[in-house]
Image: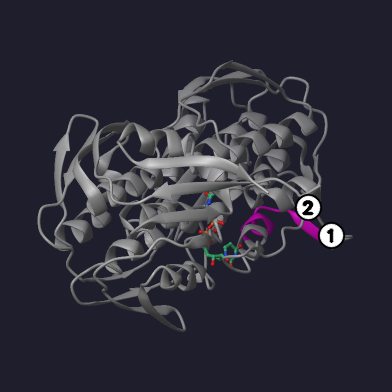
Amino acid sequence: MAEKRSIIHVEGGYPLSGHVTVEGAKNSALKLMAATLMAPGVTTLTNVPDNSDVHTMGKVLSKLGARITVCDAHTLQIDTSDVKSWVTPYELVVKMRASTAVLGPLLARFGKAVVGMPGGCKIGARKVDMHMMGLSALGVDFQIGHGNIHASAPGGLKGCSVTLEFPSVGATENLLMAGALAHGKTVIDNAACEPEIVDLATMLNEMGASITGAGTPVIEIEGVRELSPVTHGVIGDRIEAGTFVAAAGLVGDPVRVHGFNPDHLGLVLKKYEAMGISIKRIEDGLLVFREGSLLPTSIQTLPFPGFPTDLQAQTMVLLALAEGDSVVTENIFENRFMMAAELNRMGAHIRIEGHHALIQGVAGFSGAPVEGPDLRAGAALVLAGLVADGYTDVSGVEYIHRGYERFTDKLRGLGAHVEEIEVE
Ligand code: UD1
């Protein structure tokens, strides 16, 4: 019997209008869930997005002994009282690299952790050397064996100063969590400044931690003896919001995007305005539409507050239709231009040279079957389908489910002709 798989089927040519509300930030929720391990008891997280990465983190925590109660679609109660294991198997880490976020919390709670060693993924090698370098400075010994990272802090975690080689989001988060329960003071220099780091530090402080400077390159943490469970709301997802802003920039008539803090998209909005997209602030979000042509521009991805790599593919779709030439430079992941070849199959003119994409704007796309190579690129190809001539079938839907809740429903709510269907 032929195997079934899902695709997203898009009929292009219908304008979008109305309003859409984004969910809580996936990249924040995953780390907040991991941090509950550090406060034995019941932590309640609200505004948690219902996507497959969150489900995977739920499995990681359950495997460790946590009990998770789904109170409603977006509220989780995580009871970490009986967590007794410190072992996260490779099967879960390979499914979702962010499972490594339990490393710091497990070390803080048990003084030891075994976590599957993540391999590379499609968008790049994605090493964990900076996580390990930072934690080593806090007194953690590492052994790599049989595909696992074995970490232990025999003398306990000891605060110290760590300078990161690069402001890695994941390394900053692991250090933030480990430092919160270390003896003495930890300073993270060249820390990542992403809003999700601020959300994590905010919840840890609500739990009783003493962290200052989150959101700046220097974070100072005075270690405390224990943390207590709290109720915390996840911040809105700036990347989901940016994806809908991009969609509205393509065919918005207008679209209101709610449920997030527009300050988290600062540079993105400036670039989009330079591309001819009209953006107005409204309460709790933005109103987006476009009257004239799309204009070319250049973007380069950088750590926050630079242009986010997670919006690079969606923006490339806009630039591929701009009146002129643009350059996109990817500085975060070494293999994040896989979508360009698929977009070229729809009529785009994009040439990749190293970490630059040279884009010659075209008048339109023609619908085609395409393969979404990763989470954001998959969503970007759906956006391309919205303005393509005819039908576009996007495969790789399982990636889209990792980070977007009800993506096709939300687009349909705005008037798009799009549906997820099973094919053989
Ligand atoms: C997080 C986000 C991801 C986003 C990325 C950059 C989550 C779950 N994911 O990923 O959506 O695209 O930030 O904003 O929050 N690196 C090393 N060694 C390390 C750590 C990182 O070489 O120890 C490299 C990575 O391979 C990558 C770059 O540093 O090239 C940035 O990675 P990092 O900021 O750590 O991203 P993630 O935390 O993995």
Asked if the residues shown at circle 2 and circle 1 are in contact, with their CB atoms under 8 angstroms apart, the answer is yes
Q: Can you name the residue that lies furthest to the left here?
A: 292
Bin the neighbour count of mark 1 within 10 Å (Cα to Cα): few under 14, some 14-19, many 20 and up.
few
Is residue 236 visible to the viewer in this orientation of the structure?
no
Name the mark on residue 348.
none
| Colour pattern | one colour
Q: Quick one: SS at disc 2? A: strand
Q: Earlier in the sequence, mark 2 or mark 1?
A: 2
Residue 110 in the image: state x and y as whole percent. Answer: 77, 36
- The residue to which callout 1 is attached is 147
- Would you place residue 277 above or below residue 67 in this image? below
138 in magenta: yes
Q: Quadrant of ligand 1?
A: bottom right
Which sits in the foreground, 345 or 100? 345
Which sits in the foreground, 28 or 353? 353
Is residue 270 visible to the viewer in this orientation of the structure?
yes
| Span shown in magenta | 134-143
- Would you place residue 58 above or below residue 16 in this image? above
Residue type marked 1: Gly
Residue at 63% from the left image edge and 69% from the top image edge: 125
Residue at 51% from the left image edge and 47% from the top image edge: 8
Quadrant hosting residue 77: top right
How far is disc 2 from disc 1 in space, using C-alphas? 6 Å
Residue 108 in the image: state x and y as whole percent. Answer: 68, 39
Residue 234 in the image: state x and y as whole percent. Answer: 45, 30
- Position of residue 181 in the picture relative to residue 82 (left or right): left
Q: Quick one: SS at disc 1? A: loop
Residue at 57% from the left image edge and 39% from the top image edge: 30
- The residue to which callout 2 is attached is 116
Which sits in the foreground, 352 or 167? 352
